[in-house]
Image (spheres, rainbow, N blue to C red):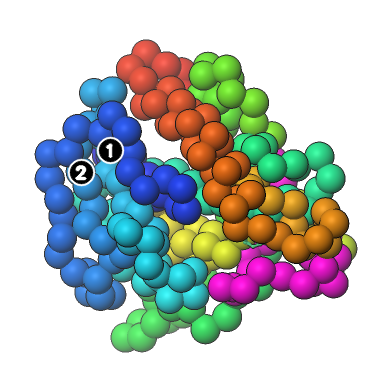
């Protein structure tokens, strides 16, 4: 079923255990991706890894060439993408350290290259986005977490804000009224582009802070870094189980 693409977010700069066979460096028709696509095997399964912010991390969320990233993974033969992303927790139970596999998205971004269907078309293309995440892949992630003994929250609505600044407390109140549970800056247009490209896409979101106004005082980067360090170990375990031969999740 083609290789599994893994997009690493903040805190997941590399994929431990990945045996790299090829570094795909070419630019796409949409320009250069954030960095090389590392193609190889993880636990014997074909995977391709791309760090969303580049290595070392240098590209802020609003400057990422999402079209090039998704195109590069498509060119590597990926039919499924698991996107790892750090998020703020809006819902009270989604405290730092929680892993979430969301099932809905609200997009608050603007001005990003958000479609492959720009011009030269016979007719406008409107992909269905009712369920923005691939249900089967999301279910596989939840199963992989269970196999790995890692707790995840299945379902929830991911709000994608423009960044790079964090939100005001009033903006988070608004997102909550809109029904959002977690907030990040990179899920869109990534998810929509994957849908346009016919690639199954799911998010493994890691809550790294309480969203603005949900805890006393400002959001501190040192605290986020500390959470990332421990949470990424859990993320790696989930991914390894996802690709493990014989695991139900890898089917
Ligand atoms: N808001 C937006 N994006 C984020 C946050 C947040 O609180 N935490 C990590 N990414």
Q: Is residue 147 left or right of residue 19?
A: right
Q: Which residue is mark 2?
A: 39
Badge 2 residue CB within 8 Å of ligand 1: no
Q: Nearer the viewer, residue 240 or 102?
A: 240
Label 2, secondary structure: give it.
Answer: strand
Rendering coords of residue 212 (x, y %): 77, 62
Q: What span is in magenta?
A: 154-176
Where residue 211 sits: x, y (%)? Answer: 74, 57
Using residue 84 as the reference point, say whether residue 30 is left or right of it: left
- In reply to whether residue 231 is colored magenta, the answer given is no
Q: Give the quadrant of ligand 1.
A: bottom right
Name the residue tied to disc 1. 47
User: Residue 223: which disc?
Assistant: none
Beta carbon of the mark 1 residue lies under 8 A of ligand 1: no
- Left/right of residue 186 with respect to residue 211 in the rendered view: left
In the image, what residue occupies the spot 39% across and 26% down? 240
Which numbered disc, 1 or 2, marks the residue that appears first in the sequence? Answer: 2
Query: Viewer-proximal residue, 216 or 61?
Result: 216
Q: Is residue 170 magenta?
A: yes
| Quarter of the N terminus within the rendering | top left
Residue at point 37% right, 67% down? 58
**Residue 18 screen position, x and y as percent:** 26, 33
In the current view of this chain or complex, which residue is farthest to the front? Answer: 222
Counting other residues with Cα less than 10 Å from the Cα at mark 1, is it few (<14), some (14-19), or many (20 or more)? many
Q: Secondary structure at mark 1?
A: strand
Query: Which residue is at 15% across, 64% downward?
Result: 26
State the residue at coordinates (62%, 64%): 160
Q: Is residue 141 left or right of residue 51?
A: right
């Amino acid at each position: 079923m083609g290789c599994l693409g893994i997009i690493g977010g903040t805190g997941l700069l590399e994929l431990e255990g990945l045996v790299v066979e090829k570094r795909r460096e070419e630019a796409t028709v949409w320009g250069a991706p954030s960095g090389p696509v590392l193609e190889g095997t993880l636990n014997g399964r074909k995977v391709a890894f791309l760090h969303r912010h580049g290595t070392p991390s240098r590209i802020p969320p609003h400057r990422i060439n999402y079209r090039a990233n998704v195109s590069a993974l498509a060119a590597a033969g990926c039919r499924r993408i698991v996107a790892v992303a750090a998020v703020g927790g809006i819902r009270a139970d989604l405290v730092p350290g929680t892993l979430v596999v969301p099932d809905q998205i609200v997009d608050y971004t603007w001005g990003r290259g958000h479609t492959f269907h720009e011009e030269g078309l016979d007719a406008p293309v409107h992909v269905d986005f009712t369920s923005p995440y691939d249900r089967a892949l999301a279910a596989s992630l939840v199963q992989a977490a269970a196999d790995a003994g890692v707790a995840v929250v299945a379902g929830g609505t991911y709000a994608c804000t423009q960044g790079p600044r964090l939100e005001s407390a009033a903006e988070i109140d608004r997102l909550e009224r809109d029904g959002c549970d977690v907030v990040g800056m990179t899920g869109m247009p990534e998810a929509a582009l994957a849908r346009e490209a016919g690639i199954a896409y799911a998010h493994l979101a890691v809550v790294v802070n309480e969203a603005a106004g949900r805890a006393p005082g400002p959001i501190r980067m040192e605290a986020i870094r500390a959470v990332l360090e421990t949470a990424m170990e859990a993320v790696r375990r989930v991914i390894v189980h996802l690709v493990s031969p014989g695991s139900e999740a890898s089917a």
